[in-house]
Image (cartoon, rainbow, N blue to C red):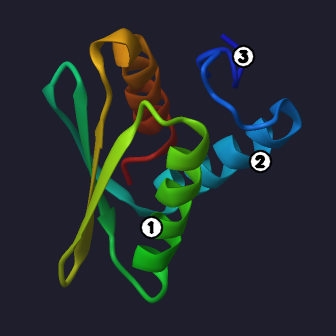
Amino acid sequence: MSDLAWVPQSCTLPTEERPLRVAEWDALFAERLTSLSRPGPLRLRLDLTAGPGIEERVRDLVEREGGCCSFFSFTVTSGKDLIGLDIAVDPAHETVLDALAARTAARGLR
């Protein structure tokens, strides 16, 4: 599977910008991901190490992602040492969440 093969047709981000967005997610996961869980088939839970500017970075990224992939629902929660990121999708996009979970695990978990 190519780096972008999992991106659904319903994504409205221009094709030429997609590799840059994927790289942003990959960098965040590589730098900050501490745990990943799947509380249900339509939900992914990520814990990211907090730090200066990280919550703002996460919120900016999820806002932009929600703008082009409206089927995602993001919830960001902040704590002293961790930032929680819950990602949910509708049943039609479960395979997208599956692919995102696999990609996240491959890029992160320090």
Q: Are marks 1 and 3 in contact (CB under 8 Å)?
A: no
Q: Is residue 19 left or right of residue 12?
A: right
Residue 29 image offset from top left, x and y in percent: 48, 52
Give the residue at x 44% y 37%. Answer: 104
Above or below: residue 46 compared with residue 104: below
Tell me the tag on residue 59: 1
Q: Secondary structure under badge 2?
A: helix
Mark 1 residue crowding within 10 angstroms, few (<14) / some (14–19) / many (20+): some
For this rendering, which residue is in front, 4 or 91? 91
Q: Are marks 3 and 2 in contact (CB under 8 Å)?
A: no
Give the residue at x 60% y 55%. Answer: 27
Provide the residue designation for mark 3. 2
Give the alpha-carbon distance from disc 1 to disc 3, as whole Å. 27 Å
Q: Are marks 2 and 1 in contact (CB under 8 Å)?
A: no
The amino acid pointed to by label 3 is Ser
Q: Secondary structure under badge 3?
A: loop
Q: Quadrant of the N terminus?
A: top right
The amino acid pointed to by label 1 is Arg
Tell me the tag on residue 20: 2
